[in-house]
Amino acid sequence: MKLNLNKITLLSVLLSAAAGARDATAYIPPSNFQIAQLVKKHKGLKSLRVKTRITGPSTQIREIGYFDAATKVWKARFIDQNDREIYAFERKLGAADSLASLLIFETSTDKVLAGLKTSGIPVVPESELLALPGEPERRAIEKTSIARLDKKVGWVIGDGSPALWVLKDEFVPLKLLFSGMEVRFEETKNVRDFPYPRAISIYRGTDFVLKGEAMEVMASPDLADMRAIKVDGLPAIPSNLPAEERTLIEQWVQWIR
């Protein structure tokens, strides 16, 4: 059976348009509900250890990090390619933390909503929606849509940048756009029901900044090794480190931790 090439092309266009129409009219949960479901996935975590390989345009380092959910403290040390410790830091969630860390670890919906709103991402708290007279007004105030990243479908909160993409039906972060940066949360998988991205990539516009790949993720580890990291807060990064390593540490701590 032979089909006319023009008919095949027309059929493809019509099918693509139909798929786009389905996406455009699909139901999108309210932004506050999306965030509440995302945060709900964090509540069972007690502690976490993550070993991450961080690759930049010209060099590579590793982070060995620990999170204690009881104290909300993340503590980590960085290792160079010669297995030498080059830096360590400690940060308490909620104290000048990054948006990425809130989206990965925070257990308070209100704190995540506040962090997103402060960064210009137009999440709408439930109280604001309920104060409106009806469903049309509630839909109108939400700035949400559906878009695709590679083969994944995301609910998008925001128009352009800043914006947060939430993986459809999974309620985990997919992409974050703010301050000229793009943070991608790739291949999120569960460790004892706690979702953690197996890779986090950062771009500045179209320029690649870095990629952090989780080599090992362990839930409920022994925190003796965490306590053995003797550091308080965010010390200055040693000036004698190569510029490429200093930049990787600065960017990873600023945008992810």
Image (spheres, helix red, strand yellow):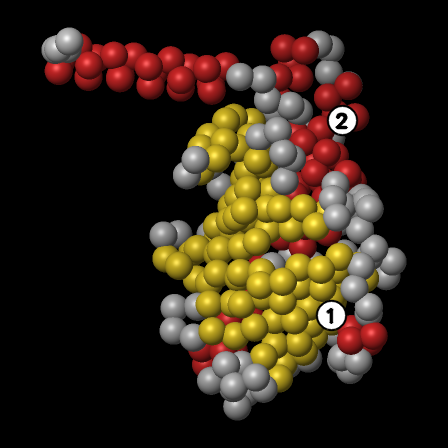
In this picture, residue 82 sits left or right of residue 58: right
Other-residue count near label 2 (Cα within 10 Å), few / some / many at <14 / 14–19 / ≥20 = few
The percent position of residue 187, horizontal first and vertical second, equals 54, 47
Q: Secondary structure at mark 1?
A: strand
Inter-mark Cα distance, 1 to 2 = 34 Å
At 50% across and 81% down in the image, what residue appears?
81
User: As shown in the figure, which amino acid type bears the numbered disc 2?
Assistant: Glu
Q: How many marks?
A: 2
Image quadrant for the C terminus? Answer: bottom right
The quadrant where residue 255 appears: bottom right
Mark 1 vs 2, N-terminal side: 1
* Residue, disc 2: 126
User: As shown in the figure, which amino acid type bears the numbered disc 1?
Assistant: Lys
User: Which mark is in front, 1 or 2?
Assistant: 1
* Residue, disc 1: 75
- Placement of 239 over or under 144, stated as above or below: below
Res 205 visible: yes
**Relative depth, front residue between 155 and 204:** 155
Q: Secondary structure at mark 2?
A: helix
